[in-house]
Amino acid sequence: MAGRNFLFVPGPTNVPDRVLRAMAVPMEDHRSSAFPALALECLNGLKAVFKTSQAAPFIFPSSGTGCWEAAVTNCLNPGDRILAANYGQFGFLWIDMCRRLGFEVEVLETEWGTGAPVDRYQAALEADRSHSIKAVLVCQNETATGVSSDVSAIRKALDAAKHPALLFVDAVSALASIDFRMDEWQVDVCVSGSQKGLMLPAGLGITCVSQKALAAAKSAKSRRCYFDYGDMVTTNASGYFPYTPSIPMLYGLRESLKMLAEEGLQNVLNRHTYLAGGVRAAVLDGWKLKLCATEPKWYSDTVSAVMVTEGTNGADIISRAFKRYNLALGAGLARMSGRLFRIGHLGDCNELMLMGALAGCEMAMVDCGMKIAPGSGITAAADYWRRNAPKQAASAK
Ligand code: PLP
C-alpha cells in the first residue's frame, strides 16, 4: 500500500529516524576494551529515566515479559505469597505467570476500566500479620484498558500497614511517558521494555532493581539462570554482559536516551499528557463515545481504549482501519475483545501524527456503520490542542 503505515498500537511505537540510523551499525566485539563505554552510557542513562541513584537498571535481551519473570524468580522463594490485582489483561498475565512458576497469588479481582484498588491492597497487607506476603505487584499503566494507577499510593499503603513486602511495578507502557519514580516511591523492581516510551524496536527487557531487592535475590532460592540478576551485577560493573548483547539495540537505546535528555524528561511527560488530552477530547467530546477507563482519575496518558457502540464489533473497525487506511490500532484483549479499539499515543508522537490516526479512526468507524459525525473527533482534538499548550519544564538540555 502506498504511503507510510500509521502505527498507533500502544507498542511497538514509532521508532524515530535518528534511532533507526543509530542502529545501522556493523557488528563489533562485545568483549573489546571499547565496548563498556556504550554499555555504561546506556545503563547510566537509564537511571535518569527510572529516576534513581540507588537502584540498578538491567538490560535483558527479552521483552517486558522476561523482566516479569526475572522479578519473581530472582527475589522470591518457591511457593512464596504474592499480592496482586486483576484489572486488565497484562496484570492478569503477570498473575498467571506467577502461578505457573509455582507462587501463590492472592488476587484482588477488580473491575476492568478501574485501576489499582489502593484500599483493598492496604486491607490485605494489614490482614497479613505474619508478613507471609513477600511481594506486591502493581501494573502502573494497564495497556489493555487504558488505565493508569497511582503507584505512590500503593507505596503509602505498604508503609501504613508497616508491611515489608517488595513492591514490583509493571511500567511497560508507562516508562518515559508517564511519571515513574523508582527511589521516591521505593519501588523494588520496575519492569519495562524497549518498544514503548523508549521508542525502540521490541527486543530489550528493561528493568530496574532496588538494593533491597538485590539483597533478597542473594538468598532467594527460586530457580533462574538466563535472567539471573547476580550475573548482570557482576558483568555490568565493568560494562559487559553475561552473554552476547544486541549491539544495534544498544546503539539505538543510547540514541533514544539522548533524545529524551535533549527534550527533557519532564517535557516528554508533559507532551504525553497534552497529546492524550487531545485524543480524549476527540473520543469524548467529538465522537461522544466512552473510554474503557471509567473515571478521569484512571485516564492513561499513553493509550486510550475506545468503547464501540452496541451492534459494532471493535475488530471490524481495526480491520477496516488497517486494510483500507493503512492504520494500525490496538485490539480489545480477552474480555474486552470486540468491545473496544485502542489508540496508542506514546513515544515519538505529535499532534499531526495523531490527527492522522484520529482521522483514520473516524473514517473506519463511519465505514463500519457507527454514528460518528465525520470530522467531529479531529475538530475536538484540534480545539483542545489550540487551547492547551504543553507545559514546558526548564530541564531540557
Ligand atoms: N505489561 C504491559 C502493561 C504491557 O503493555 C505489555 C505489552 O504490551 C507487557 C507487560 C508485556 O510486555 P512484552 O510484550 O514486552 O513482553
Image (cartoon, helix red, strand yellow):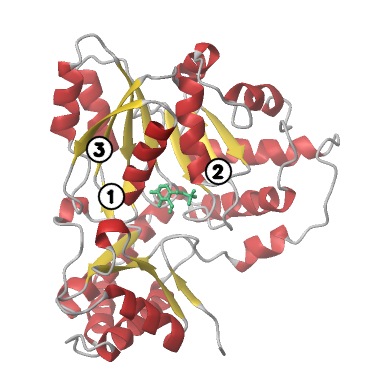
Relative to residue 137, is residue 68 drawn left or right? right
Which of the labelled discs sits on residue 85, or is there none?
A: 3
| Label 3: few (<14), some (14–19) or many (≥20) C-alpha neighbours in 10 Å | many
Q: Name the residue at 36% across, 59% down.
A: 272
Between the residue at mark 1 and the residue at mark 2, the CA separation in whole angstroms equals: 21 Å
Between the residue at mark 2 and the residue at mark 3, the CA separation in whole angstroms equals: 23 Å
- Residue 51: give x, y in percent of width and height: 45, 36
The quadrant in which the N terminus is found is bottom right
- Residue 54: give x, y in percent of width and height: 49, 24
- Residue 72: give x, y in percent of width and height: 45, 28
In the picture shown, does residue 28 fall above or below 11?
Answer: above
Q: Name the residue at 25% across, 42% down.
A: 86
Q: Is mark 2 within 8 Å of ligand 1?
A: yes
Q: Is mark 1 within 8 Å of ligand 1?
A: yes
Asked whether the beta carbons under mark 1 and mark 2 sit within 8 Å of each other, the answer is no
Between the residue at mark 3 and the residue at mark 1, the CA separation in whole angstroms equals: 9 Å
List the residue tagged with mark 2. Answer: 205
List the residue tagged with mark 1. Answer: 88
Q: Nearer the viewer, residue 51 or 377?
A: 377
* Between discs 1 and 2, the one toward the N terminus: 1
Q: Amino acid at mark 2?
A: Gly
